[in-house]
Image (spheres, rainbow, N blue to C red):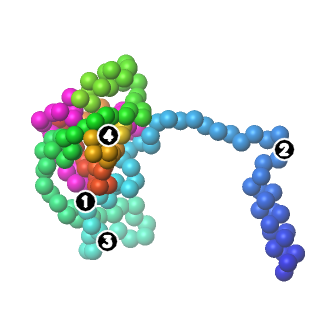
Amino acid sequence: MRCAVLALSILIGGIAVPAAGDEIRVIYDQRPEADIPREARGAGTRPDPDATGGPRSNITFGIVTDLTDYGPPRNVMPRDIHAVTVRFYDGSFQNVREVQRYLTSVLRSDKGSTTTFCPWAEALPVPAVEATIQFASGRTGRLLLWREGRLVYQDPDLRWWFAYGW
């Protein structure tokens, strides 16, 4: 038994450690993942107990728990925005000043709809902007923004919000 454990340890160690001279490949990619975050996908819904998905189905059904339209995104964000830290912006912007103008127009807009559930069905590409919003209170929120007119916001209480139409 002891020999089997030792042999297994050597085998596992041999797999985990690269041979001398082999380099571990490191890839730098600052872009966020495409689409909305996995943890946000079921936000604002509960499983439908009457749904018949089946094991071969890749479809799940949920019941929206709050159908309220909260209006423009600014209605669900604290008013005391202290700073916005842009972690990523794509090539659709010329520079960070253009990102600032665009974010300001979106965050101050009096148009749009915001919900607690994802109201669109299509998958989204990599967001055009990923940012952290810092509030004067010291709390932070997370913002993902697409040029297609979609916005996903995680507030300081970790609640997800979905906005469009600004």
Q: Amino acid at mark 3?
A: Thr
Could you tell me how far apart the alpha carbons at marks 1 and 4 are, in whole angstroms? Answer: 22 Å
Could you tell me how far apart the alpha carbons at marks 2 and 1 are, in whole angstroms? Answer: 51 Å
- Residue 66 picture location, percent across and down: 17, 60
| SS for callout 2 | loop
Which residue in the structure is indicated by mark 1?
44
- Residue 141 picture location, percent across and down: 32, 45
**Is the Cβ of the residue at disc 3 closer than 8 Å to that at disc 1?**
no
- In primary-sequence order, the first of circles 3 and 1 is 1
Hey, which quadrant is residue 7 in on the image? bottom right
Could you tell me how far apart the alpha carbons at marks 3 and 2 are, in whole angstroms? Answer: 53 Å
- Mark 2, other Cα within 10 Å: few <14 / some 14–19 / many ≥20: few
Which residue in the structure is indicated by mark 4?
133
Q: Up-down: is 82 above or below 97?
A: below
- In primary-sequence order, the first of circles 3 and 4 is 3
- Residue 106 picture location, percent across and down: 22, 33
Front: mark 4 or 2:
4
Which residue in the structure is indicated by mark 3?
52
Q: Amino acid at mark 4?
A: Ile
Tell me the number on the disc at residue 127. Answer: none
Q: Amino acid at mark 2?
A: Ala
Front: mark 3 or 4:
4
Q: Up-down: is 54 above or below 14?
A: below
Q: Nearer the viewer, residue 136 or 68?
A: 136
